[in-house]
Amino acid sequence: MSQDLHQPINNKNFENGLLKMAAQDHEAAEVYFQKGLKEAQEAGDAHLEALFYSTLGMLSRQLKDFRQASKYYDKAEKLLPEEPSLKIISARLLIDVFGQYETAIKRCQKVLDLPNINANFRHHARSTMGMAYLKDGQKEKALECFQETFEKDLDELVSAGQMDLMLLEMLVQRKVGIEQCGAYLEEGIKKARDHQEESVAALFKKLHDAFCATFVKGA
């Protein structure tokens, strides 16, 4: 069973750190996060410790200290080895910054191999895996991942707002799988309307209109 890193956190160091981070006061944010991390370690609270490592990773990434961010994410993942979000975050950092596509693919596969994984994590793991394949020049495997997000995940997502757009954007930019990309946007519109998510439906409709204007003759 995946450990839940997403429950509401009642911790002043965490809350104050996020406020400072939002205010771009990075130095003060780090002080709060490091203090919270130390207290979590002293209390033996692995869940809270992992949360602070993950948040320090976010802060380091915001500061473009990507190697330090990677170290923090690795520490968080070691504390919560079955937390899927940490593996996906780490995989995207490996793709975007370090170009370690094979390692990123393995991270995503570990998410897909977790027992009782929910559709949202499964969907984003497949999309991230597709991003790694695409950046590595393996277009067919990237499209396989993209197709699987249709066939194996979309029906189980509780909201159209959970649908990943990053792989879609990369495919469109490279003019790969254009037919599948159009179908994905249409599916987003349908799912959002079925769930009465008007703002999400409007977003997908806007993206679909722009897509059709570029790729569909007579649109």
Image (tube, helix red, strand yellow):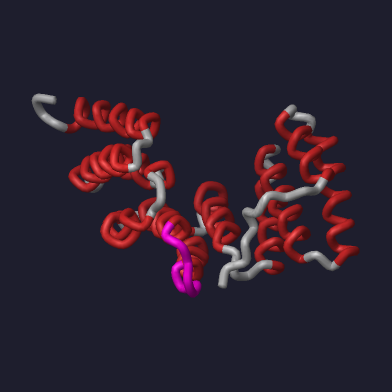
Q: Which residue corresponds to the image point at 56% horizontal and 57% vertical from the top-left?
A: 85
Which quadrant holds the C terminus? top left
Q: Which residue corresponds to the image point at 56% horizontal and 61% vertical from the top-left?
A: 87
Residue 137 lies, in percent from the top left, at 34, 54
Asked if residue 112 is positioned above or below residue 151 in the image, the reply reads: below
Residue 83 lies, in percent from the top left, at 60, 64
Q: Which residue corresponds to the image point at 46% horizontal and 73% vertical from the top-left?
A: 113
Which quadrant holds the N terminus? bottom right
Q: Nearer the viewer, residue 8 or 218?
A: 8
Residue 150 lies, in percent from the top left, at 28, 55
Q: Which residue corresponds to the image point at 29% horizontal and 37% vertical from the top-left?
A: 193
Q: Nearer the viewer, residue 12 or 133?
A: 12
Q: Nearer the viewer, residue 121 or 104?
A: 121
Q: Main secondary structure of the magenta part?
A: loop
Q: Is residue 114 within the magenta segment? A: yes
Quarter of image, res 46:
bottom right
Q: Nearer the viewer, residue 85 or 119?
A: 119
Say whether residue 108 is visible: yes
Q: Is residue 154 within the magenta segment? A: no
Quarter of image, res 127:
bottom left
Say whether residue 174 is visible: no
Asked if residue 68 is positioned above or below residue 216 in the image, the reply reads: below
Which region of the structure is painted magenta? 112-119
Quarter of image, res 139:
bottom left
Is residue 43 toward the left or the right of residue 69 in the image? right
Is residue 50 toward the left or the right of residue 28 in the image? left
Is residue 77 toward the left or the right of residue 102 in the image? right
Residue 189 lies, in percent from the top left, at 28, 37
